[in-house]
């Protein structure tokens, strides 16, 4: 059975300072701008550079995806999808199912509760992803289009920014 690697990355810390800004337009805080590159470096060091990065269109997710992509050595375009913003498990599964069959490692940059729920649906592990937390899953599918909410996956590791140097 061919296995795929799924990297789930919750957007980095974002600001609630300006109550006038729409949720979708909230920027990263200084901590978020510091954490995202560190996650990118971790991805590079662990040789987990994705073949595809898919991100929510929310500003905080886009900026996180861009910083991580830059610091991990990702060469492709970050694919921005409105569907990832405020998505539930079924929507996230549909997004991932559209990934190219030859993409062995896909990173999804999004939001909670959707990412936590997807992680639980695939692995049965109830793990909370804090901001800029990265989860590595091994997924038992030959092609992304075969991914379903009940597909067996193994949670390999979760990294949180505060645990990184």
Image (cartoon, rainbow, N blue to C red):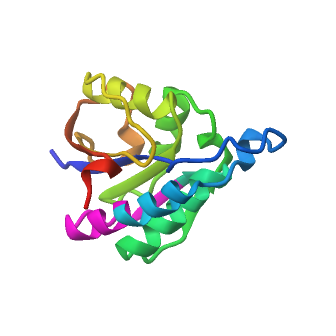
108 relative to 50, above or below? above
Of residues 151 and 156, which is closer to you in this image?
156
Q: Residue at x 26, y 28 (%)?
A: 123
Q: Which residues are magenta?
A: 39-54
Residue 9, image x, y percentages: 42, 48
Residue 164, image x, y percentages: 26, 56
User: Would residue 9 be visible to someone looking at this image?
Assistant: yes
Q: Residue at x 42, y 66 (%)?
A: 37
73 relative to 63, above or below? below
Residue 17, image x, y percentages: 71, 44
Image side of residue 129 versus residue 83, left or right: left
Q: Residue at x 36, y 64 (%)?
A: 38
Which image quarter is the C terminus in? bottom left
Q: Residue at x 55, y 33 (%)?
A: 91
Is residue 43 highlighted in magenta?
yes
Residue 74, image x, y percentages: 41, 73
2 relative to 125, above or below? below
Image side of residue 8 versus residue 25, left or right: left
Of residues 134 and 147, which is closer to you in this image?
134
Report the residue that reaches farthest toward the left: 1
User: Would residue 74 be visible to someone looking at this image?
Assistant: no
């Amino acid at each position: 059975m061919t296995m795929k690697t799924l990297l789930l990355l919750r957007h980095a810390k974002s600001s609630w300072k300006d109550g006038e800004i729409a949720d979708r337009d909230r920027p990263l805080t200084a901590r978020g701008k510091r954490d995202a590159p560190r996650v990118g470096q971790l991805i590079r060091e662990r040789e987990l550079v994705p073949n595809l990065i898919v991100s929510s269109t929310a500003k905080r997710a886009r900026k996180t995806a861009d910083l991580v992509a830059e610091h991990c050595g990702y060469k492709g375009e970050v694919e921005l999808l409105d569907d990832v913003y405020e998505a539930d498990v079924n929507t996230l599964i549909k997004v991932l199912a559209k990934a190219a069959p030859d993409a062995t490692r896909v990173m999804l940059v999004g939001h909670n509760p959707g990412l936590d729920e997807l992680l639980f649906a695939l692995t049965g592990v109830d793990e909370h992803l804090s901001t800029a937390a990265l989860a590595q899953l091994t997924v038992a599918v030959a092609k992304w289009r075969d991914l379903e909410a009940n597909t067996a996956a193994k949670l390999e590791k979760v990294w949180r920014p505060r645990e990184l140097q």
